[in-house]
Image: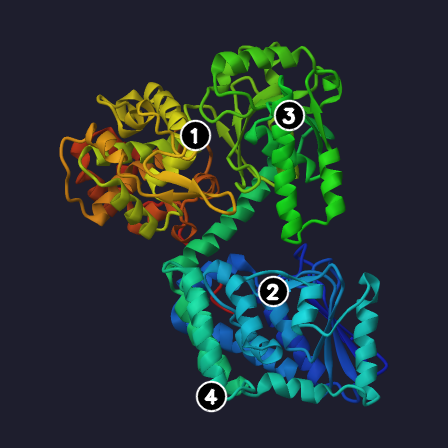
Amino acid sequence: MLFTGAAFKLTRDNDILELCFDSEEQKVNVFNRKALAEFGEVLAVIEQQTDVAGLVLTSSKGVFVAGADITEFLGYFAAEDAVLETMLKEVNSMFNRFEDLPFPTVAAINGEAQGGGFEISLACDFRVAAPTARMGLPEVKLGIMPGWGGSVRLPRLIGVDNAVEWMCTGASKKASAALADGAIDAVVHDGDVRAAAIAIIEQVRAGKLDAMARRSVKIAPLALSEMERTMAFESAKGVVGAQAGPHYPSPLTIVNTVAKHASKSRDEALPIESASFVKLAKTDVAESLVGIFLNDQALKRLARKQSKDALPVKHSAVLGAGIMGGGIAYQSASNGVSITMKDIREEALEAGLDEAGKLLKKQIQRGKLKPEGMATVLNAIQPALSYGEFGKVDLVVEAVVENPKVKMSVLTEVEAQVSDDTIITTNTSTISVDLLSTALKRPENFCGMHFFNPVHRMPLVEVIRAKTSSEQAIATTVAYALAMRKTPIVVNDCPGFLINRILFAYFGGFNKLVADGGDFMAIDKALERFGWPMGPAYLLDVVGMDTGKHAAGVMAEGFPDRMASESKTIIDALFDAERLGQKNGKGFYKYEVDRKGKPQKLPDPDVAAVIDSVQSAKAEISAEDMVDRLMIPMCIEAARCLEDDIVGAAFEVDMGLVYGVGFPPFRGGALHHVDKIGLAAFCERADQFAELGPLYHPTESMREMAKTGKTFYTKISADKGASA
């Protein structure tokens, strides 16, 4: 053993070195400050070795190297530019020394190689991977870009077009795709990766492979003429800019950076990459997206903790075979949990199976599922018109019509058919789970399980705790959501729970804005420019005006001081005019189905008369006021949910909004958004709309936080992560 540390071990077998990444402190290998410092130490030992034929870089973990330690990023980002520049320079210097060793190096990629983990493999002369390995440069998803040589080495290795696609999408590539692009040199059986890496060194020794020629490509300028470079990068800028949009600067920065250093050598190019990295790291977008990543990890840890005492769910059931029931059945079956789908009508069951079949066909078309896989999933969905097999069901999801009397009747009925240990859940978006629990003899086995539509796309599931819900019921429901590859958030019962309660404060602001003369199309455009995937009018059309009216009524009853309206709202008026939105082809907009079967939004002059019925007059309202008149109620209600203990932490509120209603990720969530504005400035702005009513009145707790300078999130100090 030539070197033994907490992260790296260096051994020598005759004239071949093996550098093994073997973190003692982490479950997976990551480049944190300690690992980077130790890499420098072991590199010094490697450089002292003589008569070496080659070096193999391996991992003792199932993951090769997961990348840099993200928990340290925000500390670096908060530090002075010089601190971040120094870290990048130090790491690049080490990676260059590793790349410049006087013998061939081979990365034996046995698992995930992401970000900095893939960048260290790019510094090797050759790369071999297991079939199950995946690799990529996902930094763009954090609002940044590769900073340890990835933007320099990858384009020189696989060409501009491929490299731009890798870096600007942040996609994780399968080994087969990476081989096709030229990012790796071979794919071998899982157990043969290390042996294959050694075999490459032997081929270099025998003169069959030229390691130095391979290396020279990565350290030289891109092998393109000036005309070829211009054409490649101008084309890339057009495509990437259109896809990224105005709120995400990193994709276009990546393209511009590669264009800038394309004519440079490696050593000239790396400072250009570093300068772009530092610029991106200082943006609010990067701070928000790194925060989203860390919040997501925290949410997953919390869910694992909450599911600790779960009962096993080997077979589930869903009651109701509509689009929602079919979506739940598909999601369960496609993730390995067989499910019975029950309805009282044969045609409903056929519709539910058709829904699952459509989703599976799309998976096949996208290459994510083999045709035989479709049969496996469909066979795991058992349609039923009776409760015949329900005695063997571990968990039931009731997904019938959103009517408390109907739901309570069905819940009473199903409880009589299942075992005493079966967990029963209700998929409701607004109805009190405390109320529904009164229909059951074993209310301790009951809770809410609110899926968002469409089920296969929306990652969030609200698990709603009734006063009578046992910890085991909550744990089992959380575990089932995780098994379905959903992100569960446990919330306490209240009107609208977490997401719809906050969302309908936003819609309440929209109702007032339209009533005061705001143009709904202008409002949609303003909120879309703010970053929402769709404006409030369009969103209401997608949700459905009938659903909107029902939910608004629940909110008004639960929070009459701020969510009840003294006059008819635009939602009421559209419902009365039978303009329900996409479900009947007309709402704020009209909808026509395109060739792919998707509804296309179009202007509809006929809606003007409906809007006129709730407006006293048209008004010129600035885009800034439009945004604030919707966002202020949403942010205040988000704070209220935290104060009312609907959830326990700010990150749960914000991740629920990002995953449940598409809150702009680059803004980090409603409470993070308030932190960025500053509570004092937020309250001051809200007070400008105080006459609009309690929706615009910050809570006393918010005002107290503003006075004392408190924030919803703990501020990251600049010294955390300030040294490499």
Residue 478 visible somewhere in the drawing: no
Foreground disc of the pair 1, 2: 2
Task: Find residue 323 and report its image quarter.
Answer: top right
Quick one: 149 or 305, which is closer to the camera?
Answer: 149
Residue found at the far right of this picture? 14
| Image location (x, y in percent) of residue 78 | 40, 62
Foreground disc of the pair 1, 3: 3
| Image location (x, y in percent) of residue 182 | 67, 74
Quick one: 551 or 462, which is closer to the camera?
Answer: 551
Q: How crowded is the residue under tag 4: few (<14 C-alpha within 10 Å), some, or many (20+)?
A: few
Tell me the kind of residue under disc 1. Answer: Asp
Which residue is the site of mark 2?
Answer: 136
Of the numbered discs 4 and 3, the one sitting upstream in the chain is 4
Q: Is residue 190 above or below residue 369?
A: below
Give the Cα distance between marks 1 and 3: 39 Å
Of the numbered discs 2 and 3, the one sitting upstream in the chain is 2
Assign a secondary structure to mark 3: helix
Tell me the kind of residue under disc 2. Answer: Gly
Which residue is the site of mark 1?
Answer: 645
Give the Cα distance between marks 4 and 1: 61 Å
Q: How crowded is the residue under tag 1: few (<14 C-alpha within 10 Å), some, or many (20+)?
A: few
Which residue is the site of mark 4?
Answer: 226
Which residue is the site of mark 3?
Answer: 349
Give the Cα distance between marks 2 and 3: 42 Å
Give the Cα distance between marks 2 and 4: 28 Å
Of the numbered discs 2 and 4, the one sitting upstream in the chain is 2
Of the numbered discs 4 and 1, the one sitting upstream in the chain is 4
Quick one: 89 or 144, which is closer to the camera?
Answer: 144
